[in-house]
């Protein structure tokens, strides 16, 4: 064999994962950076680096494909972050989208009383103001003058963009009930205590479906969507024993809903919500009818019945799902090198659909111009069909480690022998098995791996 076999064999998996390791990997490999880091950072805002941007995009694309393209009854939408301020009056957000806050009298920091255990987490003080309501919407002013007339909000949920377009969608798509409308996009909430890396942030991305149905079918529909959405996370690779469903108690339901079930993932910081599937009833359409003066009822052309549909809302967080996929994929393995030394291999076992890079092409000797030329040509050929990278900036062992850490599925190594026999070595991320494949057959071989 012309290719180095230095990797040795797999000893034992060791998957104790904590947030420190995830945060460090995200920074080291360019998944997630602190926002405005050169200025000391902006608290709880994060930027996705080159591999993080790919991963997050893959999560959204997988969602869009499953909930829109692979169904007959859901259409896509893309609405503005800024909306007419009456939207938030109608939706109830101006009046009721509040958290309780208390101020620490010593250091003046603000907390949610339910997050306190008697003591100020910042200064240790024990004297707090009385709890009061704090609206979570972020204000902004449109136009040149900062006054009440220009006051509006950065949307706290993408859902309202769907409700206010209900008539437009009916008129242009001629849908019958039940049908859904789905969109992804940024939303903003002025969280009092954000935290846990990208889990709770003030700026975040949602993936929401509003599924309109006859009121009598709403309960059944709710059950179906809970199952559908749970299975989506499983299909994309999350471990089943790390996922659970949790129905909300009556006292934790939002003002608009009669039932809600969360899909929760067991993060290193505990079980936390990835997605909520709520029965929003006819609350929103009724409210918008009232405030706008437009009739948002659905008319059934066969029965002539006219009514407000009920809405089932599967509402997921893109950043939360991305973080869960990262945490779940993280593995550390002890492997033995040629000199019997043991070292740790960090590998992201992301699914084929989610892995930010599918293939890396690596020249074994970057000083050999023929090897480099062939490697670059292979990369050019493959990049039309697969996300492919080329890297020659280190020795092969190090290059493999880097690719393992971002979850690259296959590494293709071009060596001296490749120039003679027109074959390259394809290395599998998970098994580390290596196979010689002829350059002519490479695309066909890889297409088979990715399509099955
Ligand atoms: Zn304090």
Image (spheres, rainbow, N blue to C red):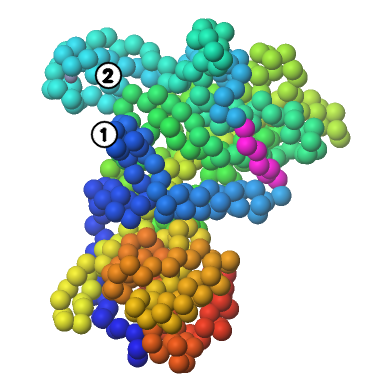
Mark 1: secondary structure? loop
- Using the rendered image of the protein, determine whether residue 393 is visible from the camera's viewpoint: yes
Residue drawn at x 22%, y 67% as measured from the top left = 344
List x then y, in percent, for residue 10. Answer: 27, 76
List x then y, in percent, for residue 232. Answer: 52, 53
Q: What residue range appears in magenta? A: 73-79
Q: Is residue 288 left or right of residue 438?
A: right
Write down the quadrant of residue 334 in the picture. Answer: bottom left
- Using the rendered image of the protein, determine whether residue 433 is visible from the camera's viewpoint: no
| Residue underneath mark 2 | 110
Magenta-drawn stretch contains 419? no
Q: Is residue 59 left or right of residue 120?
A: right
Residue drawn at x 51%, y 20% as measured from the top left = 153
Residue density around tag 1, few if under 14, some if 14–19, many if 20 or more, within 10 Å: few
Viewer-nearest residue: 285 or 186: 186
Question: In the drawing, what numbered circle is on residue 447?
Answer: none
List x then y, in percent, for residue 104. Answer: 21, 15
Q: CA distance from mark 2 to mark 1?
A: 21 Å
Instruction: Identify the image quadrant of the C terminus.
Output: bottom right
Mark 2: secondary structure? strand
Instruction: Identify the image quadrant of the N terminus.
Output: bottom left
Residue drawn at x 42%, y 16% as measured from the top left = 135
Residue density around tag 2, few if under 14, some if 14–19, many if 20 or more, within 10 Å: some
Answer with mark 2 or mark 1, whichever residue precedes in sequence.
1
Q: Is residue 358 left or right of residue 90?
A: left
Viewer-nearest residue: 25 or 295: 25
Q: Is residue 6 above or below residue 101?
A: below
Please identify, in this view, whether the residue under mark 2 or under mark 1 is nearer the observer.
1
List x then y, in percent, for residue 45. Answer: 36, 35
Viewer-nearest residue: 85 or 174: 85
| Residue underneath mark 1 | 40
């Amino acid at each position: 064999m012309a290719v180095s076999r230095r990797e040795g064999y797999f000893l034992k998996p060791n998957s104790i994962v904590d947030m420190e390791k995830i945060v460090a990997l995200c920074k080291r490999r360019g998944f997630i950076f602190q926002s405005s880091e050169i200025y000391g950072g902006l608290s709880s805002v994060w930027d996705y680096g080159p591999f993080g941007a790919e991963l997050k995009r893959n999560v959204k694309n997988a969602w869009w494909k499953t909930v829109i393209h692979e169904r007959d009854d859901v259409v896509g939408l893309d609405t503005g972050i800024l909306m007419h301020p009456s939207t938030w009056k109608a939706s109830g957000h101006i009046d009721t989208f509040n958290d309780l806050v208390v101020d620490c009298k010593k250091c003046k920091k603000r907390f949610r009383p339910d997050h306190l255990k008697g003591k100020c987490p910042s200064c240790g003080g024990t004297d707090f103001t009385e709890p009061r309501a704090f609206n979570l919407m972020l204000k902004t002013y449109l136009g040149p003058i900062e006054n009440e007339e220009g006051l509006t909000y950065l949307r706290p949920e993408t859902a309202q963009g769907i409700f206010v377009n209900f008539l437009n969608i009916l008129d242009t798509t001629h849908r019958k009930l039940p049908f859904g409308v789905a969109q992804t996009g940024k939303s903003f909430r002025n969280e009092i205590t954000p935290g846990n890396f990208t889990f709770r942030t003030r700026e975040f991305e949602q993936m929401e479906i509003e599924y309109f149905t006859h009121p009598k079918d709403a309960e059944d529909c709710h059950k179906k969507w809970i199952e559908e959405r749970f299975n989506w996370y499983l299909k994309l690779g999350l471990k089943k024993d790390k996922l659970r469903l949790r129905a909300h108690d009556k006292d934790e339901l939002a003002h608009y809903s009669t039932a809600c079930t969360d899909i929760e993932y067991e993060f290193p910081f505990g079980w936390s919500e990835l997605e909520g599937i709520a029965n929003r009833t006819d609350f929103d359409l009724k409210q918008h009818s009232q405030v706008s003066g437009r009739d948002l009822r659905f008319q059934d052309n066969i029965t002539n019945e006219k009514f407000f549909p009920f809405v089932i809302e599967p509402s997921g967080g893109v950043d939360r799902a991305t973080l869960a996929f990262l945490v779940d994929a993280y593995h550390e393995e002890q492997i033995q090198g040629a000199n019997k030394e043991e070292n740790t291999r960090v590998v992201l076992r992301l699914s084929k659909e989610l892995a930010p890079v599918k293939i890396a092409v690596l020249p074994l000797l970057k000083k050999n111009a023929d090897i480099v030329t062939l490697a670059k040509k292979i990369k050019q050929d493959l990049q039309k069909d697969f996300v492919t990278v080329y890297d020659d900036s280190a020795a092969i062992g190090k290059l493999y480690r880097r690719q393992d850490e971002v979850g690259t599925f296959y590494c293709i190594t071009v060596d001296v022998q490749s120039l003679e026999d027109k074959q390259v070595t394809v290395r599998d991320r998970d098994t580390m098995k290596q196979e010689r494949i002829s350059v002519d057959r490479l695309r066909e071989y890889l297409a088979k791996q990715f399509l099955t």
